[in-house]
């Protein structure tokens, strides 16, 4: 579960910016292939889409900067009681849910078994099946922000983000796809 604090929002901005960057890279690749294939209409379409996505990325980056300024200002102005209340808001006690690190090995195993990559929904479904015996009741509860999404699924997606940061999963995999890296395969061999 994401704690209610400014760094969680900053992390969410980072994830969003990474996803937008990945989409820009994908669209640029489509445009480059179209240009090489002399499909000028498709190349122009990709260029226009890339411009829109780049503008969106810049807007999100400005919003992130604005948020960081607001969060810094709020932190300076808050008294200790307010700071303590913010830290406790929405916070789950340690041990109430399955830790994020518990998702690493199942994610790596599912991706390796699938040939190195897989569609997000399929990977999550399989990870859920594998982890079913160890998931806690709280993990199965729906998120307040998305009642159709159980906490474990959200936790697995955050685990994926951490695994990308650690180099276990590819940051540049196509949108909607998770892919293992060589470092991820090495981790799987050590732990598997």
Image (cartoon, helix red, strand yellow):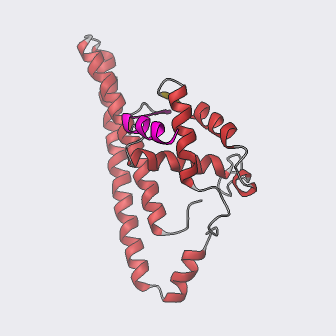
Q: Is residue 172 visible?
A: no
Q: Locate the N terminus by quadrant.
A: bottom right
Residue 179: percent from left, percent from top: 45, 32
Overall secondary structure of the magenta section: helix
Total labels: the figure holds 0
Magenta part of the protein: which range? 177-192
The answer to which of 12 and 180 lies nearer the viewer is 180
* Residue at x 48%, y 38% (from the top left corner): 188
Residue 115 magenta: no
Residue 51: percent from left, percent from top: 31, 36
Q: Is residue 179 left or right of residue 97?
A: left
Q: Quadrant of residue 30?
A: top left
* Residue at x 67%, y 43% (from the top left corner): 131
Residue 35: percent from left, percent from top: 25, 17
* Residue at x 59%, y 56% (from the top left corner): 99
Q: Is residue 133 left or right of residue 61?
A: right
* Residue at x 54%, y 42% (from the top left corner): 105
Residue 149: percent from left, percent from top: 67, 47
Q: Quadrant of residue 175?
A: top left
The answer to which of 10 and 109 lies nearer the viewer is 109
The answer to which of 169 and 70 lies nearer the viewer is 169
Q: Residue furthest right?
A: 137
Q: Is residue 16 visible?
A: yes
The answer to which of 104 and 125 lies nearer the viewer is 104
């Amino acid at each position: 579960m994401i704690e209610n604090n400014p760094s969680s929002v900053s992390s969410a901005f980072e994830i969003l910016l990474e996803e937008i960057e990945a989409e820009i890279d994908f669209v640029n690749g489509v445009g480059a292939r179209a240009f090489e294939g002399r499909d000028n209409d498709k190349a122009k379409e990709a260029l226009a889409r890339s411009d829109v996505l780049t503008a969106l990325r810049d807007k999100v980056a400005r919003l992130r900067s604005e948020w960081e300024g607001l969060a810094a200002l709020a932190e300076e102005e808050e008294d200790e009681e307010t700071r303590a209340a913010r830290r406790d808001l929405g916070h789950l006690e340690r041990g109430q849910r399955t830790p994020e690190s518990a998702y690493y090995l199942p994610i790596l195993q599912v991706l390796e078994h699938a040939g190195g990559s897989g569609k997000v929904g399929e990977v999550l479904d399989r990870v859920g099946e594998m982890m079913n015996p160890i998931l806690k009741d709280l993990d199965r509860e729906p998120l307040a922000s998305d009642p159709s999404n159980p906490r474990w699924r959200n936790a697995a997606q955050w685990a994926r983000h951490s695994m990308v940061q650690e180099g276990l999963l590819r940051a540049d995999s196509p949108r909607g796809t998770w892919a293992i890296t060589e470092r991820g395969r090495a981790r799987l061999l050590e732990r598997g």
